[in-house]
Structure formats: C-alpha cells, structure tokens
Image (spheres, rainbow, N blue to C red):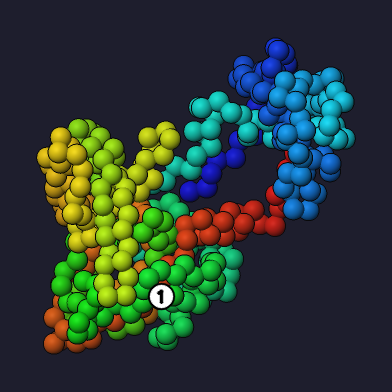
Amino acid sequence: MSRPHMSAPGSSLPTLERDKIGLSVIWPDGTRAWFHNYWLRENCHCPLCTHPQAWERTLDMLAVPHDIAPAEVIVDASGLSLTWPAHDAPCEGTFYSWDWLWENRTETEARRARKTQRTSWRAGELDMDSYKVSHERVMNTDAGLLEFLEHIDDIGIAIVTDMPNTHEAVLGLAAHISFVEESHFGRSFEVESKPDPENLAYTSHSLPPHNDLPSRTQIPGVQFLHCRTNDAVGGESIMVDSLSVVKHMREHHPEYYEALSRIPVQFNSIADSWHILNRGPVIALDEDGDIIGTRMHPALLGPVDVPPEDIDMFYRAHRKMMEICVDPDMQLVFRLGAGDCQVFDNYRIMHARRSFDPSTGHRHLHGCYVTSDDMRSRLEVLRRKGADFRKT
C-alpha cells in the first residue's frame, strides 16, 4: 500500500499569518499549518543552499541565525516566496509550492496521515494465489517487480513461482531488488536437515513462530526462502502476521501488550563460530505507538534478565503471545513446492515449520536476506516511474 499523496486543497490562494518566530498557512478548506522561520530557511531549495543534482543540503546551518525571519514574503498562485535579510549563508531566495508545504506540514496529525497503512491479516483472510508472481515477471518487467514488492510492503508476504532450480536463483532474485544482506550465516544459507546442526532450522524438528535473528542489533529485513526440493512428508510452512497478533493483545490483554513493548530482554545466538547477543522488547513500537514488528524467538530468548518485579509479568505476557501465535486462526499454513520462493518481511512476519520425516524424502530450501530499507527504496523508485524527485 503506497504512502498517500496529498495535494493542497482548494483552488483559491491560502492566506498567511505571521508571528515572531514563524508563519501560519491557512488553506481554503480551513486547515492551518505553522512553519518555524528557521525551518523555512533550512529547507531552501535554491542552488546556493541545495545541490541541484544530488538534492542534498549544502547550506551551512551554523551560518544562519536561529532567530532569522523573512525580510519579504510574497504569495501567489504557484506558492510562497521568501527573501531573507543579509546573513553569513548566501541564498538566492526561497520558494515553496503550496503542494510541497502541504505535504511537509509538521503537525502530528499531518505526519501521521503521511504514514503508510499496511493491511493486517489472519489466516482465513488471505488467498495466497493472489500474492503469487512468476519469476519471469519479477525479473523481466517493472510491473511484475512492483506488484511483488507491494505485496511485501502491504501484507508482508509474496510468493515467487517457477524459480530456476539453481543455487544462484535466490541470490539473483534478491540482487534484483538490492544488495544481499549478509549475516553470521554468510551471504546465503541452506535450510536442510544435517548432522551436527548449529541451528534448529537445520534439523527436521518443528519450528515455532519466530522472527529470524533477534539476537542481532539490526534484525534482518526481507527474507527469501527458495524451495529447491520438498519431497519429505510434513514440513508445511507457516506464517503469522505480527500486526494482527499484537493488535489482538492490545485489545484483549493490554497489560501484557504494555509489558512486552516496555521490557527489554536478551536474545542470544551462540555457536563455535559466533557469539551474538542483543537486548530489545518483544514488541517494537514507533513514536506514535504503532507496531513496527516483533522480536519473537523462543529458542533464542534469554536467559531472561529483567528486574525481579517485572519477570513474572514478562513470562505471563510472553506465554500469552506464544499462545496467540499458535492459534490456527492466526496461522497461514501452506506447502512450498520446488520452484516456489517464499519472501516476507522478517521484522513483521513470524514464520514457522511443521516437523518432517527426512526418511521419506529430501527437503531443501536456500535462503538469504535484503534490508528493509533497500526493499522500500526500490519500491518507491518504481512507484515514481522516472518522475523527478527534486520537488519544491
């Protein structure tokens, strides 16, 4: 789901009101937005303040007085023009279109309205066939790549079908989006049952719903799991939407929701070749209290080292969240076939697996990661369709 584009309302001119440190723009529909004078100077797009190609600020902000105010303000149909008094930072004059000012209002409600609203889901609400895109379309058409990335951005999941059965296929798919994100597992990893495994994923055991590698300070972003072979009995894939799980907790168990979003706990990943520890809350929220994602991984949790007054509440809350995650209503269960690639937002989507019997056949997935930032960057560039990002 794209970030909403909001054009300034009305056809007549906005009006202005000035005070000592800023000015208010009043649009024809009555919406008011206040802009600090320093902010108006800081964001100047003239060639002396912003590099015309890189579109990055070249202005020396320490050369701008904090109490600067426009010497002249001109309003016309195209926007707002400002002339500044002489100071140590040269400027050709500042211009802002009404649309630019509207899209960059600083009020909390305006900022929240600009946020992408993603679709939360439960198992019965998804038709997985609607979120499948062929490998040929993703790799060879911008429309196919855009569709694929928008699925990941909106519901957190996509399935790429008809992948070549080669070691390079999943890395090529990931690199078609951006750089492959390496971890202590390397540039990619093979998920199959093997002797002396350093990770439960490399066994035939069932895996509970989890986010990969919460033991890392920066949790891996988008995860790719390319099914090379799946002949074993069992091993069905499971996905759970953390947005839906956490919303359920917030509504029905607010005290547990509060505890898991407040109390940081330790996660660890330790083997002969690595020793990685990290602390963080199980539920991650942004500044508005909106859900960013989760760090749920029972196998990598702890030892839990929270204050004694918090530990009982933490365990009650953590158990309740695990119970919700294994509720059949939350679990999307499906079987990957050879040539399918399961791609998902690892910070948002918890994935799991049923146990399988390796004596009945081989099960082999090949995986890698791409950062969430790079995925969303590629998505926004595709949405732009070549339009100039340099806006005033």
Q: Residues within 10 Å of mark 1 (few under 14, many from 20)?
A: few
Choose between 196 and 211: the one closer to the eye: 196
Residue at the image point whose x is 53% and y is 37% from the top: 114
Tell me: 179 left or right of 338.
Answer: right
**Residue denoted by label 1:** 186
Q: Quadrant of residue 271?
A: bottom left
Give the percent coordinates (x, y) of residue 82.
81, 26
Task: Describe the element under mark 1 as helix, strand or loop.
Answer: loop
Q: Is residue 346 above or below residue 271?
A: above
Specify the quadrant that holds the C terminus.
top right
Residue at the image point whose x is 51% and y is 60% from the top: 375
Residue at the image point whose x is 24% and y is 75% from the top: 198
Choose between 334 and 381: the one closer to the eye: 381
Give the percent coordinates (x, y) of residue 89.
82, 34
Residue 160 appears in the rendering: no
Choose between 204 and 141: the one closer to the eye: 204
Choose between 126 and 353: the one closer to the eye: 353
